[in-house]
Amino acid sequence: MLTAYFSHSGENYFSGKIIAVEKGNTAIVADKIAAMTGCDLFEIKREVDYPFGYRDCVKESRDEMASGTRPKLREYKDVSGYDTVIVAYPNWCGTMPMPVFSFLESTDFAGKKILPLCTNEGSGLAKSVSDIKKLCPKAEVAEGLSVKGGNANECDDDVRGWLYNNGII
Ligand SMILES: Cc1cc2nc3c(=O)[nH]c(=O)nc-3n(C[C@H](O)[C@H](O)[C@H](O)COP(=O)(O)O)c2cc1C
């Protein structure tokens, strides 16, 4: 199994406050999944980093989304050697950050099982799962897990339950 994740370090919004973090919420959850399952990890990174500042980052992500941009990635990953791929990402303006779109379109997910995991500040999975289904029509897309970003350090039980329900552990 592979866990492919996108996560933004720098400023982010936590329960009404802007705080700078060195490690993003989704990266924290992805590391937990790797520790629980022994899966491979792949970080989806845009070729050019997003701005450090929260407001600049929101603006840039909105512009990319509005224009349907598929940003270039620093590295690409072939998923042919995996049966199951967890795709973990933050909710950015109602769906996944556009580099996750680039990743999903860059390799063949036919016949694979995708497990979506979305960290967010309250909007849940929003449109992300239906977007994954559109981008990977030949994959089996399991029920996604929503994790409150600010609870990333304390989400072990929820993540373990979701992995168990999906037959991973
Ligand atoms: C550009 C941007 C847009 C965001 N949009 C939303 C949103 O629409 N709904 C929501 O609940 N949280 C939103 N958030 C909050 C993140 O989804 C949440 O903090 C997430 O856990 C961040 O994960 P990360 O630290 O791994 O990047 C947004 C954060 C950023 C930086």
Image: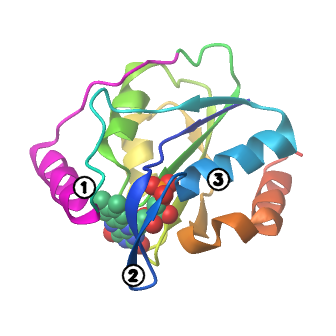
Image quarter of the N terminus: top right
Badge 2 density bin: few <14, some 14–19, many ≥20, Cα 10 Å? few
Give the residue drawn at x 34%, y 48%: 97
| Picture quarter with ligand 1 | bottom left
Q: Is residue 104 visible?
A: yes
Residue 148: horizontal and vertical position, in percent? Answer: 57, 72
Badge 3 density bin: few <14, some 14–19, many ≥20, Cα 10 Å? some
Residue 115: horizontal and vertical position, in percent? Answer: 63, 46
Tag 3 residue: 28
Give the residue drawn at x 45%, y 19%: 107
- Gap in Å between the C-alphas at discs 3 and 1? 20 Å
Q: Residue furthest right?
A: 169
Q: Quadrant of residue 17?
A: bottom left
Badge 1 density bin: few <14, some 14–19, many ≥20, Cα 10 Å? some
Mark 1 sits near ligand 1, with its Cβ under 8 Å away: yes
The nearer-to-camera label among 2 and 3 is 2
| Residue type pointed to by label 1 | Cys
Q: Nearer the viewer, residue 108 or 111?
A: 108
Q: Nearer the viewer, residue 56 or 72?
A: 56
Mark 3 sits near ligand 1, with its Cβ under 8 Å away: yes
- Gap in Å between the C-alphas at discs 2 and 3? 20 Å
| Residue type pointed to by label 3 | Ile
| Residue type pointed to by label 2 | Lys
Q: Is residue 36 left or right of residue 7?
A: right
Element at label 1:
helix
Residue range (magenta): 54-77
- Gap in Å between the C-alphas at discs 1 and 2? 15 Å
Q: Which mark is residue 150?
A: none
Tag 2 residue: 17
Q: Is residue 132 left or right of residue 152?
A: left
Tag 1 residue: 57
